Amino acid sequence: MRLAALSAVVLAVSGCARGGPSGGGAGGEALAEARSLAEAGRLDEALQKAAEAPKDAESLYEQGRIWTLKARQAPLPTAAPPVSPLPKGVAPPPPPEFKEEELRAADLFEQALSARGDHPKAGLALAELLAPHAARRHDREKEAARRRRGRAAPPPVAETDTAVDWSVDRALRLFQQAMQAEPASRGPAEALIAFAVRVDRLDAAEEGYQELTRRVKESPEPHVLYGDFLLDRRKDPARAVEQYRQALIWKADDETTRRKLAEIYLTRGADHYRRQEYGMADAQFREAAKYISDPGSDQAGRLQDFRQRLSQLRW
């Protein structure tokens, strides 16, 4: 298999010694120097230095990280030359999905996870490596489904690199595992949210938002973000109100959040008014008034207009 061959090359070149964890001693020094070289952009030297550390999860992760940096500098992969002449009706082969450097990085991250299944950095790094590929795959499958206009489900997009699982589900699992492996960090939760929203997996995104509100305490920010998600993506203003109110507990004078709450209640009130549910409309307008601070604002003007209309009706 393609990835297995690459793995053999990496290990042959590395000459990693088999020993204990590389967290300290000569192994730790080698990894520290490798990181310093990588930060200076001396990636080939960094790889050689990282290979001097014992072959454990940390050194494998560090080599994978350096290969990821090399992948960013590498050109996009190109397709193999098609047979000539190309048979009629046969499309030329597409370019490989992954760069060679990405495959090497993925293999090293996989090895790091095999050595230590809860390695948070390796899991997150692999997830972030696979995420853009999985997102493009999602887009292609979504477009194929749109073109079929509700007919039978289209076949899944074929994997051009079968040695690596770059499905949306795999990337999501890696983000979720990385989030659980780092219970005090907000980074993995935010990464899960960003990817899950990108690929329309709203349940997974909500899992990330809920975790973010648990990890970032005594702050309005995660509640506002979660409220925006519930309002814009879930179309669930009732639950969004709960999060915005929670945000105001930590910052009662946040005018942006207050305007969001006022807008939800104004919209609800207008809907009830159009349905001639005047009592319910009045209740929503009363709630909106609690969050409108500027009497000259557009929201204040709309509220006054509806209240005047209600005052002229018998209900």
Image (cartoon, rainbow, N blue to C red):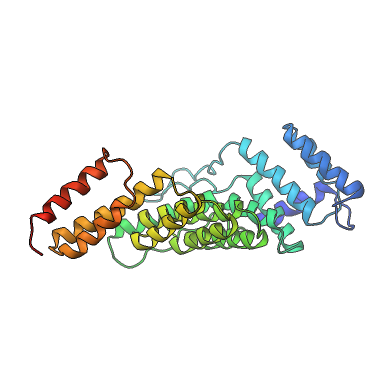
* Image coordinates for residue 46, horizontal then vertical, percent: 78, 38
Say which residue appears at 60% left-offset and 54% top-offset: 188
Say which residue appears at 13% left-offset and 56% top-offset: 310
Between 236 and 278, the one nearer to me in the picture: 278
Residue 137 shows in this picture: no
Between 93 and 293, the one nearer to me in the picture: 293
Look at the image and tell me in which quarter the N terminus lies.
bottom right
Side of 126 relative to 275 (left or right):
right
Side of 91 relative to 305 (left or right):
right
Look at the image and tell me in which quarter the C terminus lies.
bottom left
Furthest residue toward bottom: 152
Between 20 and 231, the one nearer to me in the picture: 231
* Image coordinates for residue 175, horizontal then vertical, percent: 58, 58
Decide: is 50 above or below 3: above
Residue 134 shows in this picture: yes
Between 261 and 135, the one nearer to me in the picture: 261
* Image coordinates for residue 122, horizontal then vertical, percent: 69, 54
Say which residue appears at 86% left-offset and 43% top-offset: 30
Side of 120 relative to 242 (left or right):
right
Query: Where is residue 21, by image quadrant?
Result: bottom right
* Image coordinates for residue 79, horizontal then vertical, percent: 53, 43
